[in-house]
Image (spheres, grey):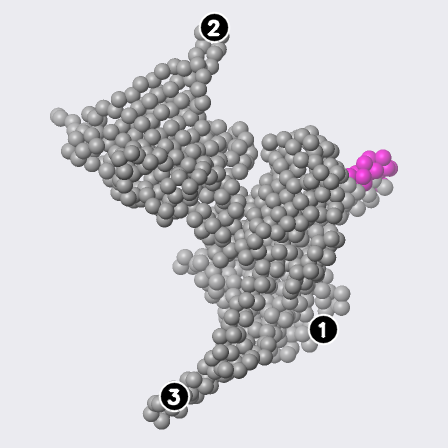
Amino acid sequence: MEYFTFSVDSALLNELGEKLVETVQLALIELVKNAYDADAPEVTIRFKPTPNGGGPEIHVIDKGSGMSFEKVKTYWMRIATTNKLADDKSPLYGRPRAGSKGIGRFACRRLGTKLELITVAERKETHNTETTCYERTRVSFDWKKFIPGSEVTTIQCPGEREIIDEEQIGTTLIISGAEKDEWNLRSFNVLKRQLAVLVANRGVKRKGFKEDPGFNITLDVPQFDGKIKDLRKELLSAGWGTLTASIDSDYRAVCELEASRIGTRTITSKQHFPHLKGVSLKVGIMPISKGQIRKTDVLSLEKMKEILPDWGGVQIKYRGFRIYPYGDDDWLDIDRDRGRRKGPVEGELSAFAVKLRDVDPNRVLLSMLSMKNYIGTVEIDSAAQGFDMKANREGFIQSEAFDELKAFVRFAIDWSTIYRDYYIRKEAKKDSEAAREYLENVLKSEIEPGKIVESAVNYIEKELKNIATELPAAKSKELQKTIEKATNAILTHEQSSKKELHHLRLIASTSTLLLVFSHEVKSLLGLLENENAALASLEKKLPKSDALFVKEIREGLSEAKGRFADLLGLTSLIGTDSRIAVPQTLALVERLAKAKECYQLIVKKYDISIEHDEVPNNLVIYDILEAELYAIILNIISNSIKSVIAAGGNKRIKITAQRENGKTVMKFLDSGLGLDEAEFEEVFVPFITDPSGKLYQNLEKRLNPEDKYIVGMGSGLGLSIVKEIVQARNGSIAFRKPKGNWKAELEVILP
């Protein structure tokens, strides 16, 4: 018997290096990803002009862990090695591997005809005593030797290794023989935008690994940028604005904002910060809006969306070291204030806001972005006083100095928010004025404020009717009738939208109170925990009969605390920024149980049964925001509770769910008043709260006055909001004719 083995033709390298990696910028990105995976804190990319007028000589220099001679031989020289798949995190910092296919090195072939690899790794030799030395490995590759028809394993690449006493570890790739016209300004800008995702890593601590100092890239490419550039600094100045602040010799905050359509603005605070000598900050302000990106050569909207969830936040560095958890949490209370819909600025900033035209100092903070939309760092050096670390090294002990630090950073951010609100109003006014002027030129007359839509529709109607007169009589009459219906629909919709906007403002004010309540209760829960501990201590000192009484009180408080904590967890979803929040796969049973808890008091009080036993424990809803799923469940259960209370008698609500034809089908059944089939569609129309007139009339009779605040008396928007969410997730919602003793059946289908 004879055996056969595969051989590898050099043409394979052409497939890997030139066809799989289609462009030079993607090829270079693959090499930088390799440096990231090697735990490099920084990389330098250098383009050196060549004297013969050809393409640039490209140097990729990293300060990563380097490779030993054996690793070069075992991994680098092995095509499509799987070592990164076997270990999907970098060894030192635990970075998720950016590359995994084992072909990134052949990107060098796409960039030029020759490669010189120089890598230095630490090597430990033990001769009675342990000493540290370094191993430098150098290999040269001439890709022109790997011609189709030749055997890859027979082509030799000369190399050498030497043991040295002292050297900077890392890897240098020198690529030459590039084609003359491969690189241009456009391809270089594509490269920068792709690399922006990597430099957004400003440092993080991963469990079981050494603290990651972050990753930075320096570009030394005079052909396009004209000077050496720090890509992270470029990233921070690529969004809508860059905010810097420091403390002057009088201990006042000196802030500077450089922003789109605003230019450079400065302010010096009246407030003093005596503990913050030497403190400074630099923050990139990054709203998710394509029109507000100042440097499109560095940052794209898609890359911004990729960066912000992982790396957004204002970090703190104390004496050069990052302090956790600041930057991962809402230590500046930005999202808390956004959740509360806090509008006014206070103190000296209020007086400042008044001076800006069209800015309302009582609503200006409504333009504040989420905590994740700010990327930057506060630097605290040794000159600052009053900062003491907690025993576990996780954050600072609460102090006057730390309170000053928060006030300093919020002063700067709130000031920049005032200018951002000014910018938004200025841009909106400019667009509105441009539209109005254009229409006035067309109509040859002035348009009253608030009547732009009406004037535009009337003009279109008039012009179309003129066109219709040119048609045969029958078609002209038909077209004019269609025009009248269409224009009437537009004007009716505008009036409805104005009414809806007014109503939504009222709802927004209600949610403001809810979130204020939520925040205040969180602080009370901490006090409740302390009181519970005090009662537990008292319980041990009392006689048995009294101790049992105290124990019952303590257990009741614990139960109430747990219920409040669950409810507050739901209210926090209201403050989630949906532009940044990511759709998830969510277990349905868990969300149904939490939703039921929201109505626990009313359910017990009115003896209402809510069943969801038939919902499988493993059933999930795919690709939906958690806030959206709760909005669906809570609105529907709320409507059912109202209906069963209004109907009286046996008050039952039942929820079922199952997977059918690749979709999740949920059914909400209740024993309430029910709906006429003629009302099945009408109830989804905004502001129609009770089409039959029976619900609230009966509810008023059976509901205790104090419970109106729990079930609500109806805005007419609940089911319309639910329908919008369901349809946005490619689902459907409809009332069905109920079977058996049920009076209403609402079916929700989601992918």
Distance Cα–Cα, label 1 vs label 2 = 91 Å
Quarter residue 605 falls in: bottom right
Label 2 crowd bin: few (<14), some (14–19), many (20+), radius 10 Å: few
Farthest residue toward the front? 51
The residue shown at (48%, 38%) is: 230
Three-letter amino acid code at the position of disc 2:
Asn
Residue with the mark numbered 1 = 700
The residue shown at (39%, 14%) is: 163
Residue with the mark numbered 3 = 468
Q: Nearer the viewer, mark 1 or mark 2?
A: 2
Label at residue 128: 2
Q: Is residue 695 above or below residue 269?
A: below
Q: Quadrant of the N terminus?
A: top left
Farthest residue toward the left? 1
- Magenta extent: 532-545
Measured as percent of width and height from the top left, residue 191 is found at: 39, 44
Label 1 crowd bin: few (<14), some (14–19), many (20+), radius 10 Å: some
First along the sequence among labels 3 and 2: 2
- For the question of whether residue 592 can be seen, the reply is no
Front-most of 550 and 387?
387
Q: Is residue 17 magenta?
A: no
Main SS of residues in magenta:
helix
